[in-house]
Amino acid sequence: MPKFFVNERPDAETVLIGENARHIGRSLRMRAGEELTLCYQGTDYFGVIKGFTADTVTCEIRYSAPSESEPSLYLTLFQAVPKGDKLEFVVQKAVELGASRIVPVLTARCVSRPSPSDFEKKRQRLQKIAEQAAKQSGRGIIPEISGIVTIEQAAEQLSACQCPVICYEKGGEPMDKTGIEKASTAGLLVGSEGGFEPQEVELCISKGAKAVSLGKRILRCETAPVAALSIMMHLSGNM
């Protein structure tokens, strides 16, 4: 059943406009009587198409339910900005795996160092990638792509999570020793090419984060968040 994200809570009779209406009528060529799902802030609204105009689609909502695809763990990925288009890959896979928010971080070893204003243009593209990944994977929300932050800001935000962890290439605790199975919120900080400066790790640990290891092999900066997210979702019962 096709799913469409909406910006307002659907009524018993809901009129869709804009991109959703165009996609339903022109791209998918759906017809009156066909079923669809509207998704608003983690709740799925199930209905049928009642009719069309040139620019609108009218739907009758029959019932609603919490989205079964949303994890119980609210996980924020803090990703140090990598080179090239690697961040696009990370965003796509993080959304598919269940991350609720993605925060790009500027660390000492980041080769790519966009200014906040330059990054804003890229953030809009990344948000679109997150939306497409959310639709493809059946998510109940579109995860937010934050503006770029400093490592100091990331450490503060990370400390607000019940289970804050930083993946450290020089070793740390196994992920199953972090207590993530009891947490409702988690933060995961992953480095760019070259990892972290020792003082950056010390800063995060001083704020309450735990350094964790992903094993004896060194993973690429775009592989590490996929591996770590998969482990965290599994340990929290969301895989």
Image: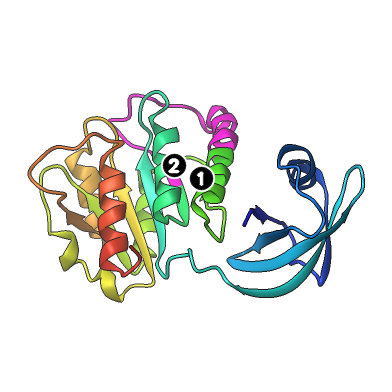
* Labels 1 and 2 touching (C-beta < 8 A): yes
Residue labelled with disc 2: 91
- Where is residue 198? Give x, y as percent: 17, 42
> Which residue: 79% across, 46% down?
21
Amino acid carrying mark 1 in the image = Ala
- Where is residue 130? Give x, y as percent: 53, 44
Q: Nearer the viewer, residue 67 or 176?
A: 67
Using the rendered view, name the quadrant where residue 38 is placed: bottom right
Find numbered disc 1 in the image and state the secondary structure of the residue it sits on: helix
> Which residue: 54% across, 39% down?
129
Point out the stretch of residues depicted in magenta. Answer: 103-126
Quarter of the image for the N terminus: give it. bottom right
Using the rendered view, name the quadrant where residue 218 is placed: top left
Task: Indicate left or right for 131 with 28 as reference.
Answer: left
- Residue furthest to the left in view is 216
- Where is residue 27? Give x, y as percent: 72, 38
Find numbered disc 2 in the image and state the secondary structure of the residue it sits on: helix
Residue 201, compared with residue 46, is above or below; it is above
Residue labelled with disc 1: 133
Quarter of the image for the C terminus: give it. bottom left
